[in-house]
Amino acid sequence: MHLMNHIHIPFISSADSNTPLEQIDVLMDSMPKHAIDNEPWPQFKSTSAAAFAIAHCGDAVLLKYYVKEDVIRSVMYRTNDPVHKDNCVEFFIALEAEQAYYNIEMNCFGICSMGYRFDGEERRFLPEGTIEKIRRNMILQSVPAGSGAKYEWQLTVIIPAEVFIFSQPGSLTGKKARANFFKCGDDLPNPHFLSWNRIVNDRPDFHLPEFFGTLEFGRTSDQ
């Protein structure tokens, strides 16, 4: 039996999928932070620290990542490039009782790759036009000496429910899901693979839905 993390995702009545990103960015800072601090493969040591805040507004997932690390590498610049090789954060989600899941991966400049995959099958990349509906705002800055890391970056994301094109969930309110959140950097000088929900596997692999935690999209206004 695997221990599964759970998040009750607050519903924000004052926002929707068209709310300015700057407003969402500030709003997410008031939400609880969830650490991406499991190191399933300790042979890949990292000084990176990552956390996220999550909420929803019925027609979209609102997500903000907070990352501190020592090296910035951003080579990928096109939608559906292998952004996991750069400084990358990821959100995998299976809606309701679906066995298939979506994986949304973004590097520190917001370049996004999104796929849909059944366990054990090849990933199907979503069309660029669909992925471009995911609105992103990033902040990257160096931090003062002695802060424990050289760089800090934040990525605020509005993921409209309509991008889940194989599921067509409509409103997310009251829905349940299984998910995991990740921080990685396969081609960084010190590759690392961090997860929100714990994974047990011999080698680095995020595509293991049996280790997803659970999400519940709240019904009543928290804002």
Image: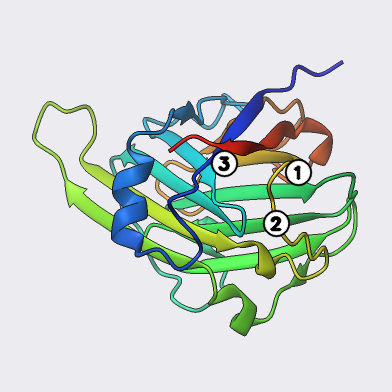
Which residue is painted at 51% across and 31% down in the image? 36
Residue type at tag 2: Ser
Callout 1 environment at 10 Å: few (<14), some (14 to 19), or many (20+)? some
Residue under pointer 1: 175
What's the CA distance linking mark 1 and mark 2?
A: 8 Å
- Confirm or deny contact between disc 1 and disc 2 (CB under 8 A): yes
In screen coordinates, is 92 left or right of 202?
left
Identify whether 182 is placed above or below 155: above
Q: Determine the residue positioned at 43% across, 38% down.
A: 223
Above or below: residue 171 compared with residue 53: below
Residue 107 x, y percent position in the rendering: 45, 59
Which numbered disc flags the more N-terminal residue, 3 or 1?
A: 1
Q: Mark 3 — residue?
A: 182
| Comparing labels 3 and 1, the label whose residue is closer to the camera | 1
Nearer to me, 158 or 4: 158
Amino acid at dot 3: Phe
Q: Which residue matches tag 2?
A: 171
In this orientation, does residue 110 appear? no
